[in-house]
Image: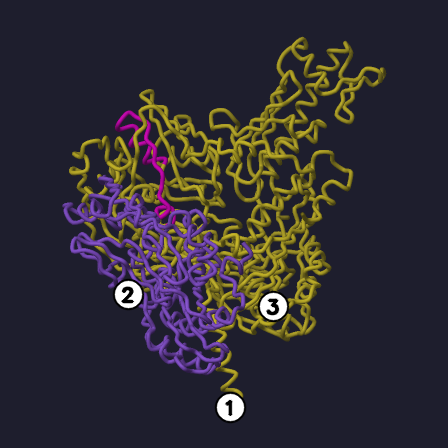
Chain colours: A yellow, B purple
Amino acid sequence: MSNASKNGNGNGKYKVIGTRPIRHDGVDKVTGRAAYGIDTHLGGMLYGQILRSPHPYARIRGIDTSKAKALKGVRAVITAADLPPSEADEVLNLVEGSFRLKDLRSNILADEKVFYQGHSVAAVAATNLHIAEEALQLIEVDYEILPHVDDVVAAMRDDAPLLHEDLTTKEFGEDTGKNSNIASHIQFKLGDLEKGFAESDIIVEEEFETASVHQGYIESHNATAEWKTDGQLTVWTSTQGAFGVQKQTAAILGLPVSKVRVVPMEIGGGFGGKIPVYLAPQAAILSKKCGHPVKIVMTRADVFRSTGPTPSSYVKVKLGADNSGKLLAAQATIAFAAGAFPGSPVGAGAVCVLSCYAIPNGLVDGYDVVLNRPRSAAYRAPGSTQVNLAVETLMDEIAVKLGMDPIELRLLNAAEEGTRRVDGAVYPVVGCRETLEQTKVHEHYLAPLSGPHQGRGVATGFWMNAGLKSTVTANVNEDGTVNLMEGSTDIGGSRASIAMQFAEVLGLPAEAVNPMVGDTASVGYTELTGGSRVTFATGWAAYEAAQEVKKILIGKAALYWETTEDEVRFEEGDFVHSTDPEKRLTFKELAGHLVDLGGPVVGTGAVDPNSGVGGSFTTCIADVEVDPETGKIKILRFTMIQDAGTAIHPSYVEGQMQGGSVQGIGWALNEEYFYNEGRMQNASFLDYRIPTCLDVPMIETVIVEVPHPDHPFGVRGVGEASIAPPPAAIANAIYDAVGIRLHELPMRPDRVLAACLAKEEAEAATANG
Amino acid sequence: MQNFEYLAPETLSEAVNLLAGNEGQTRVLAGGTDLIVQLRQGALSADHVLDVKHLPECNELGYAPSEGLTIGAAVPCHRIYNDGAIADAYPGLIDAAAIIGGIQVQGRATFGGNLCNASPSADSIPILIAYGAECVIAGPQGNRRVAVEDFCTAPGKNILEKGELLVALHLPSVQKSSGAHYLRFIPRYEMDIAVVGAGASVQLDEGGKMFVQARIGLAAVAPTPLFAREAGQLLSGKEVSEESIETAALAAQSIARPISDMRAPADYRKHLVKVLTRRALLGAIRRARGEFVPNAVQENGQ
């Protein structure tokens, strides 16, 4: 357990915040009673299956579904012809970006072309799964195979196969009219770059590449849809945002949002990958055609081939510093593989790349590139990990060249209040320096290494964190408890952290608040669970709802005591008569009297806070051991130090930090989409190697608390930043251990070995020469 | 998943008759950890699935120091590694049994099934080869015995003819001053398929200084598991030394003809053959000398 318990409990500021109550949804989850999307079973339900493209790129000349439709037990077969037609310029604006409706529809059911292996081509509903599966084999698709491109640098070339005839490059927001796979080119500029490099005593520059990786949630995608004869569609699904599914599904099907109700089921992991819809529209159309509910569940191979991954990347960074280590200039070129359709998080990558340091002169170019791979999706701090590898490796090179301690170098340049970022934003109070200072004195950082081929590396990372719309409704029960309806699906213990913020305001124990996640028809509009925003924004809504409940209850107490509201005070969780202090009611006592005090007590919080540009900073320490004969890496020890603002429930803050660390370690060492001829070869958890519990040590955590200046409790959000720095920290540790620099993820054993052997050869050549 | 007929014969002759007489494709089911997955993925098809878990001969696990070890084809890994006498006598076998899948898989998975599945990367096969194990096969023409190294013919293919069934594996008795070790390379620390596997068994002289004989088996470096016959023969009568071990490791490396795939590039696999053969031999030698050499599970502290 980290020192968060000290931070959280010891300062006496809060009663509930900083404690570690058992999560409200915990018992159901550990006993297997919680209902996930796949647990949906409705009367008369049929089973759907999706036919997916075996080719990375092909034109669909025709689809013959007649044999499939004739199979006994098949109730409906659909193709893109069953979707509404799209206008070329129709755009759907979502929190995660603006997308052409045409692209969203094509990703649901391909019309003219398939753009990747796994692209959905047709869907079948049948009385059981096996019949549906058999029917897929009876659908005849006439493909004209096209030459494909699945490497981000190759896709940017003028002679690359083009994916979309109507896609032209947008440069700095303006349409260039040039037909290309480069969907957009963005740029951030600060100061005078040439002058900065000219004044630098030391310049380091390298190119980096990272493989596409998957979010790796355990629960596969699923959707059950029922389209009733009154035209009302209901969707049960696992999602990070019920309202987002509602909006996407309605737009894709050409319906008003009011016709679509989305019921978010429990979710078995998301990490950004459960924001887009993949199955709800197909299930809905199938349901409409056959008049039954239809359920579709992906196989693991479908999940890999057709959903998710984070973009592969090419990143080139150049840093200039003076002899003291002070950074004077930085340049970054970032190309992200968006997959089949535009929309990679290259903008976020361009913000994050130089975000940890005060750099007076900077230039960042970002490219969003389409190619023949699945449409990429958000993954924990989208875009930050890819760019972090580059900058944090180069920071290590500077530290080595100057003979400086890597933490001292980072402290010298740390972003702080008033630092202007390359994108123009100016930081308010942030905790970058504080995480570094905690790292410098951490026992792990000071401990000696214990053997040969061992090394230690550090890296600092950042995620910007979001605010956005959230709603919470609180209903006071006569037994003194409160039902809390909120719109954020719970992927990381957020029910508890939202309930605790509500409880703090009213002096209630966390257990007296019963948080529930509502569907789109039963709770106010709430944006997705993502951007590390839920504890921040939905927690803020809970705070507002609690304030309203408090205000109403003061009125009720006044009524009870037959006095005026200004005679009633709320102190230490009790309602007190100001002039007659003998009169004192606990929350529970007052709740018990409500039945005679004129009606229900309901409080609402509906917020849309701007999170500012504070974000969350994090620094990690990695110790590794390299087997020089095989190139295999063992993580010996790993510590994550992160600014949480205020840790509401320290266990779940630590859980986020540990989860991000482990995903970062997986990204660093073994995870990758392995392609051959445009086809993914390792679409299973056997060969797509996420870390097992034997691959990581217990991740140690230190929660730093530099409160967010605007949030009522100082919450910053902690869900994402911790995934960014592990690859660089591990790369730096490998350098410390065996003297090699790897510039490509994953740092697979064969790559480590090849670099070790190349170094030996070079040293031998030098010795002989 | 396609419909199939499930058969569970209770005598060997009934099983052989069904296998010989059935029309269409009959697949043999032991633990099912490969078969069921392959049927679900559509990688294999089956009209009949014949379960050998009800055959007494397939459930035999018999060990006598003078006779050797008999492992029925339906005996799951956990029965092998939970038998103290077998674990003491054949530690190399336990190295393999303890790393095939995870605990749940080891509750079902069998050495017999692992062999019949004939995957080039099967963990059980190199150590069976190193131990000089034989396959006991029943068929319409009676029983026959075949050396394990001659059993697999291609990825997923073996020498069994229609009507034939692997009944058991037989390992010869353990000689004095002998030891064996299997290890594999995987990028993770558990739950993976071998990038390269190497199994070695050695018999030393009484002083533990000279090799009497040695056998080496390799996984994942050719279309079938390999018996590195020459590499082992090179050690007979040689002194136990870095040089002799290196010579054997190089000989093993020279017969490897791996492919590049998602699990590793070919040149890297080739490099690993040498490293792993050396490490397997060193482990086997230490065990022959009575030293404790942990298997992967013990090493990970599980």
On the image, numbered disc 1 is attached to which residue? A768
Q: Which mark is residue A505?
A: none
Q: Quadrant of the C terminus of chain B?
A: bottom right
Image position, residue A82 (x, y; %): 26, 35
For the question of whether residue A696 can be seen, the reply is: yes
Q: Badge 3 is on which residue?
A: A455
Q: Residue at x 22, y 57 (%)?
A: B143
From the image, tell me which residue sits under label 2: B147
Q: What range of the chain is rendered magenta?
A: A280-304
- Percent x, y of residue A639: 63, 56
The answer to whether marks 2 and 1 mark residues whose Cβ atoms lie closer than 8 Å is no
What secondary structure predominates along the stretch shown in magenta? helix
Q: Amino acid at mark 1?
A: Asn
Q: Is residue A600 magenta?
A: no
Which quadrant would residue A288 be assigned to in this image? Answer: top left
Q: Secondary structure at mark 3?
A: strand
Depth check, front residue: A671 or A62: A671
Tag 3–tag 2 contact (CB < 8 Å): no
Where is residue A392? Give x, y as percent. Answer: 58, 63
> How many residues crowd mark 1 within 10 Å: few (<14), some (14–19), many (20+)?
few
- At label 2, which amino acid type do we have? Ala
First-in-chain label (1 vs 3)? 3
Closer to viewer: mark 3 or mark 2: 2
Q: Position of residue A381 (x, y in %)?
A: 53, 50
Q: Secondary structure at mark 1?
A: helix
Q: CA distance from mark 3 to mark 2?
A: 47 Å
Mark 3 crowd level (few <14, some 14–19, many ≥20, 10 Å Cα): many
Which mark is in front, 2 or 1? 2
Q: State which quarter of the image contains the N terminus of chain B.
A: top left
Q: Chain of mark 3?
A: A
Question: Which chain is indicated by disc 1?
Answer: A
**Element assignment for label 2:** strand
